[in-house]
Amino acid sequence: MNVSFAMPQNNRDIEQKIDQLLAKMTLAEKIGQMSQRNGFDGNAAMIKAGKIGSLLNEVDPDKIRQAQKLAVEQSPNGIPLLIGRDVIHGFRTIFPIPLGLAATWNPEGVRKGARISAKEAASIGINWTFAPMMDIARDSRWGRIAESFGEDPYLASKMAVAMIEGFQTDDLSRPDAIAACAKHFAGYGAVEGGRDYNTVYIPEQLLREVYLKPFNAAVDAGVSTFMTAFSDLNGIPSTANNFTLKQILRNEWNFDGFVVSDWASISEMITHGYCTDERDAAEKAVNAGVDMEMATSNYEQYLKELIEAGEVSMETVDNAVRNILRIKYRLGLFEHPYVDATDFPEMVNDDYLKTAGQIAAQSIVMLKNENNILPLSKNIKDIAVIGPMADDKFEQLGTWTFDKQIEDTHTPLQALKEYYRGKANIHYSKGLEISRSRDHKYFKEAIKAAKKSDVVLMFMGEEAIITGEAHCRANINLPGGQEELIKTIARTGTPIVMIVMSGRALTMGNILDDVDAILYAFHPGTMGGPAIVDLLTGKKSPSGKLPITFPKVVGQIPIYYNHKNTGRPPIEKNFVQIDDIPVRAWQTSLGNESHYIDAGYKPQFPFGFGLSYTTFAYSDIRISNKTIKMGDEFVVSATITNTGNMEGDEIVQFYTHDISASITPPVKELKGFQRITLKPGQSKIVEFKLHTDDLAFYNQEMKEVTEPGKFQFWIAPNSDSGSPTEFEVVK
Ligand code: NOJ
């Protein structure tokens, strides 16, 4: 790229410029900076008058240029616009959904993907993305779990930071860097019942321990902006929450970027029952620290009046404008407001596609592989390809892909045909029109295809639109007639490899025994097809691991690995099943434990789980010192050996457990992970360096402390394996 611009201003310079600019601005212009509108059409006059600070959802490069020109060359103070867009897991080149990205456990890949997305988006004039979403989600009924990095605060923090770094780089003023947005602040992933926009109650200790962790990491990584959540938090809407927006974000974390509301979330505080009218909503939002209003116009209508009435101070408005201008300066928008697409690499170029394919391959989790049916035998002659997700260029991309062009998509069927050309016959049937269909119109041809094949590849899952915002499900089995189709095909006796593309953890208990292997691909994006085929054919070994616990049945939710213990934890040998209970049994509390009599206590698949074509042995698990002095560093390590006969990646996980503390501790907490590549027979020593501060938790006074005492650690392939090693932290 042949663009060269002045180095970024240092912070003091920027603050001076902001002061000078602010001194020249009228109140109307200040309020303008705090207002964001949807699209360019109809907004030209307002931009020209300096009454709009940002546009979202404008993706016509000509209109973006026109809008910037009006702002820079004709508005009173020539302040450029922020052009925002939901670039969530790709712009044109679509990467796996964030839940799939988290399954890679590869922050470097996530960084690379975000870099590509930033370049594509920036090339048309977008300079701000509403990503990453870093809401911790423990409930797959919630449609937006697809946009999340899953249930664990440590993994989510690493992924969020990597994405921010990819979008912003270490120099936000580069023309190919875009501002990132930490959303949704805060607690949105804990909506009751997994129903979108719903009530959220999170005690402060849990909020700090789990839900806020990725946001704190985002501030440390220099994220430019924050977005509030639609939901309320402990009775106060997130969009007017002084505690999260002021106390935590500004006072404790010293965030100096700006906060934007979510779409109409200021007005929605009236419906929440927290504000009497729009004027009241504007007052509460601005006074809580929401600097910019998305989509609605309460600030534009009422801020002036609120200032005159003394309900909002000029200082509050000035601070909000400062925060916004700071990001505009950091982005270098005053120096280079216009973008020339020819300065950027072409979108969806071969390099981008290659990266998207690599990331997709790493995001796929193998959940079952009976009799090593995978990788497919080289001698295979006839392959049935069945299912609504086998050849659907649209659906495999997942939620939030506004700027895709579906012809870019490479489907599994295409990739299989290409791979097996001249080597094997592909017999294709959709099986079902779409994932929700129930009719049997393709069943006959599907059965026929299965009968004449050596193996059936069933591409099942969810269409993109039944995942994502507002698309929550109370039943998270494979939708429509898919279970019936699987059972029908299973009766042919041909072995089944099921590939699932979906936006959440699905409950698969009904069909688990009917299939021989499962590759869980989430929604894998543009290059999902070739990535899946690389795994099916053994060009690569599966290496993704689950970023969320998979329940057996929906009634087990919430189910997550880092839960607390009870006074009566389940013990496998005492486990009582519903049918074992004698009729008219005497009610007693003896032997009573925390489990479901009809679903047990174990999930279907634990957090961190994923199979490989090769096998890995964990040995020589050590700690540098079994007694660690408070304030010291220590190292834990293990030797990992590839004991199989294929090269593969292993994601080595490191967990700790505080045996007793002044707040009941989780049974396990992820504290580190590494993705390593091993050739057959090869060994590697994997080390995790820790400080006793890394064992800290929020105590009853909400102070982060490490308490002396006994701990355990595991270095293991998933959250439900390995055995603990004890160590002690002493004063
Ligand atoms: C609403 C969503 O909650 C948010 O995540 C998104 O960024 C905005 N709409 C803008 O599209």
Image: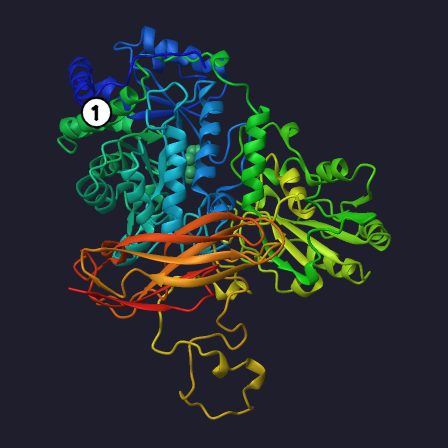
- Look at label 1 and name its amino acid: Arg
- Percent position of residue 130, x then y: 40, 33
Q: Which residue is mark 1?
A: 322
Horizontal arrangement in the rendering, residue 32 relative to residue 412 (left or right)? left
Vertical arrangement, residue 730 with respect to residue 387, above or below: below
Q: Name the quadrant of the N terminus.
A: top left
Q: x%, y% of residue 180?
A: 37, 32
Q: Does any portion of residue 136 appear in the rendered image?
A: no
Looking at the image, is 602 positioned above or below residue 252?
below
Q: Secondary structure at mark 1?
A: helix
Q: Which quarter of the figure is the C terminus placed in?
A: bottom left
Please provide percent x and percent y for residue 658. Answer: 29, 66
| Residue 38 or residue 60, whichever sits in front | 60
Whole-percent x, y for residue 136 in the image: 39, 50
| Residue shown at 18% from the left, 18% from the top | 13
Q: Which residue is painted at 62% across and 51% down in the image?
A: 646
Q: Is residue 693 left or right of residue 42?
A: left
Count neighbours of disc 1 (C-alpha within 10 A) and say few if under 14, some if 14 to 19, many if 20 or more: many
